[in-house]
Image (cartoon, coloured by chain):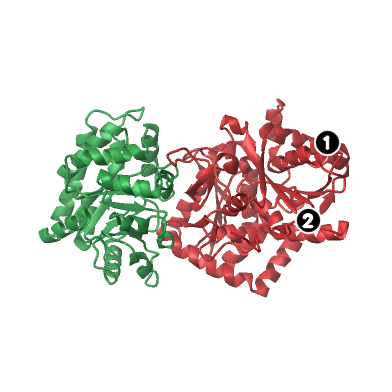
Amino acid sequence: MSNTNSRIDRRFAALKAEGRAGLVAFITAGDPDHDTCLGLLKGLPGAGADLIELGMPFTDPMADGPAIQASTLRALAAGARMTRTLDLVKAFREGDADTPIILMGYYNPVYAYGVDRFLADAKAAGVDGLIVVDLPPEEDGELCLPAQAAGVNFIRLATPTTDKARLPAVLANTSGFIYYVSIAGITGAGSATSDAIAAAVAHLRTGTDLPVAVGFGITTPDGAADVARVADAAVVGSAIVRRLEANLDADGKAKPGLVPDVLGFVGELAAGVRGARK
Amino acid sequence: MSLNTYRAGPDEHGHFGIYGGRFVAETLMPLILDLEKAYTAAKDDPAFKAEMGYYLNQYVGRPSKLYFAERLTNELGGAKIYLKREELNHTGAHKINNCIGQILLAKRMGKTRIIAETGAGQHGVATATVCALFGLPCTIYMGEVDIARQQPNVFRMKLLGAEVKPVTSGSRTLKDAMNEALRDWVTNVGDTFYIIGTTAGPHPYPALVRDFQSIIGHEVREQMMAMEGRLPDTLVACIGGGSNALGLFHPFLDDAEVAMVAVEAAGHGIETGAHAASLTGGRPGVLHGNRTYLLQDGDGQILEGHSISAGLDYPGIGPEHSWLHDVGRVTYVSATDTEALGAFQRLSKVEGIIPALESAHALAEVIRRAPTLPKDHLMVVNLSGRGDKDIFTVARELGVSL
């Protein structure tokens, strides 16, 4: 089912060859404004992000905690919309042919854009994969199967409630990698223990050869390193977004130095991930 | 598509036509499948039915009366108007019917903690009530804006022992309360049962809530046969998420001679954009676990609804209504804040019954429609709730300070 030669596959193959896990960095498209976001996006690979998750802003992010809720609303207030999100990817691709970009978000903005048109435009812009929180396997006909057919990876979330009986359904039409949500909860909430994560990753590996990325609750370089020892990638979202938020003025506008400060933090996370197995 | 029944839905995937479905995070998926299994088993269990029947009769006070509104009928000079008196239920609205069903289901499933969202506070009060009745801890999510305009219900919930959590995100109304309840549920998957208050959300909620509310229509059928010897000609109900309307309509969907009219909240008027009429002013989208008509912009961002009535102020509608709208079985109209206020005062003065502002939207349509119909036309309006909770809002609108 998977596209064996997608940009995501190639990146994970390269990481494996290097003998290390990857860092997946999340930012919200258009937060705090289009240009600042583009600056961040372009800087992420240099700072050490191996893959990028770009959030598609939505008014009602039901699975997200306060940090990403605020981030998505800031982006919308600054004029973010789906066409602008795809513009960001296009602009990023002009300078980077190798770093995978995964769009992450909720289904309604995609549905409103039109699934076929969205897949065509996303592919053309240089999007490699999709993570859509409110599309479980039961709704695969909506976007997952059309995405696979269009050559865009559809990355599924597995969670602590995904038991043995359900795992095959979760793995069935997924490609690129599996995203293990390490806690039952929203983004930016608590964190799981290293032992629990290791056990969960081992459980997932019984059903798939796809790389396993682990996210939710990773906030520090040490936390990222812990995950990097047992998984193929560590995903950090809320902590990066909070760092961005700390660089906003009272009106929510970017202060000078936002981009280097956030990228500096991403660099620390990357160092944690890269040093984990040494 | 030709249909021999309108009552068969949803299909096994929770779809009513293209509407409904299970658009939830993976974390919740196993819980929703468990709920479906538990509900399917309970539905056919005589013990469950008997237990529900006991509480609906002894605790809620069912059956609710079908009352001939003679003075209103004479004033309007047309159709014979009957009020289905759901406002006489314990807690003052139809919401308790569903809460009794869901809490018995929660108990069967061994859940020990209840959460719910509320707009006007009627569902919150009903949930807090059944939690007190069965001794379960209860957390109610309510938008800050709604808390401000529904103070009496907030206090009621607290008296009943519920924790009321103000929701400060987004537009701080019902849709945000639902987001927050979903965030709670996804965090507390082991012990928590989410009592959804309307015929919306992921499958099986729309069907389950409809089934629990269908007692309204079943009673009306029996009562009308006893009083008039035939079925009603027109059913009228207000619609936010749509549970009181579906509860009244569903048992009659296959009776071709029964017309049905559902009344959305037109707020300041559909043309102003400040309304909560998803079918009249929205288009299909996906939110809160189901595909349905939604108020949204061109980018798929959800718009804030507006209605004088907090209970109708939701940018979506139950998926079965979206389907009934598309297939044309139910007529969907709307009434403005002003029309609802007028109907609110009129029923109070003419019949001595203060209706909820939600139900006043249905009455506004009755006031429009009844005079155009013959005197032998039997019209039933669902008086889904009582208006005590709304007196502060209405006083403010009328320029009276209490």
Choose the circle earlier in sequence order: 2 or 1: 2
In the picture, residue B114 is in which quadrant? bottom right
Q: Is residue B206 left or right of residue A245?
A: right
Q: Colour of chain B?
A: red
Say which of A52 and A244 sits in front: A52
Q: Chain of mark 2?
A: B
- Which kind of residue does numbered mark 1 sit on? Lys
Task: Write down the chain letter for disc 1.
Answer: B
**In the rendering, what colour is chain A?**
green
Q: Is residue B325 above or below residue A181?
A: above
How many discs appear? 2
Considering only vertical position in the picture, is B329 above or below A60? below
Q: In which quadrant is the C terminus of chain A drawn?
A: bottom left
Position of residue A215 measured from the top left corner of the image (x, y, whole percent) = 30, 55
Could you tell whether B371 is left or right of A186 in the image?
right
Query: Farthest top residue?
Result: B399
Residue at horizontal 54%, vertical 63%? B112
Residue B380 visible, this orientation: yes
Q: Amino acid at mark 2?
A: Ser
Provide the secondary structure element on which disc 2 rests: loop
Query: Where on the picture, by quarter, is residue B199?
Result: bottom right
Secondary structure under the numbered disc 1 in the rendered image: helix
Residue B64, numbered circle = 2
Q: Residue at x 49, y 66 (%)?
A: B33
The circle drawn on residue B349 is 1
Q: Residue furthest front?
A: B2
Task: Locate residue A197 relative to residue B56 in the image: left or right.
Answer: left
- Examine the image and state in which quarter residue B150 appears: top right
